[in-house]
Image (cartoon, helix red, strand yellow):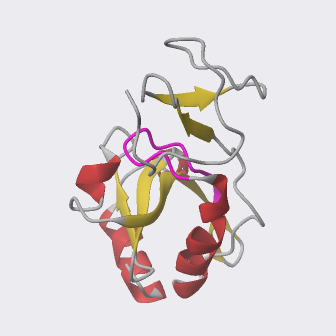
Amino acid sequence: MRTAGEFAAWVEERAEQPVAELAAPFTFTVGLGDSLRLAPRRSEHVACAGGELVLSAGEVGFRRSRDGWEVETVSNHSTGYCPDTASWPAVAAALALIGLPHPDAFTHAVVFRRCPRCGRCNLVREEHYACAFCDADLPEHWNVDEVALP
């Protein structure tokens, strides 16, 4: 979706669902043209994006305010794309494009790193930059799109 009208139509399609259902996080992707795609939470991000490249991906939750709908929570949690936390500006631009008020940054930022030794993707927790699979040191900079060296 690229307009407030498209978002309103999307919400209207779900009008019979309880408000809590709309507050539950949805899978999202932001395409190369700044368009926002939404799918049910348990959807794969790659399917949500139609297999296309993305600027960001994650989960987003909405809440109704006095002025309409707004973003309550948003993260870059996508194990399909493993986006960097630096992808926030693309998310903010897509949300602004459809007129949705939103936080100033990811409300839950996830740090992904690819292991230079075994090539597997890791979710970094509590700033512990060690591979969960082979215990190798993980780089401090985002490297998921780099070619992995098995």
Q: Residue at x 41, y 33 (%)?
A: 149
Residue 20 lies, in percent from the top left, at: 53, 45
Residue 54 makes an appearance in the image: yes
94 up-or-down from 48: above or below: below
What secondary structure is the magenta-colored segment mainly? loop
15 up-or-down from 150: above or below: below
* Residue in front for this viewpoint, 27 or 34: 34
Q: Is residue 74 magenta?
A: yes
Which range of residues does the magenta coloring cover?
71-83
Q: Is residue 44 magenta?
A: no
Residue 49 lies, in percent from the top left, at: 29, 61
Extreme top residue here?
134
Q: Is residue 46 left or right of residue 15?
A: left
Task: State the count of labels.
Answer: 0
Q: Residue at x 69, y 55 (%)?
A: 106
* Residue in front for this viewpoint, 135 or 53: 135
Q: Residue at x 68, y 47 (%)?
A: 141
4 up-or-down from 127: above or below: below
Residue 73 makes an appearance in the image: no
32 up-or-down from 84: above or below: below
Residue 81 lies, in percent from the top left, at: 41, 49
Q: Residue at x 30, y 67 (%)?
A: 13
Residue 17 lies, in percent from the top left, at: 38, 51
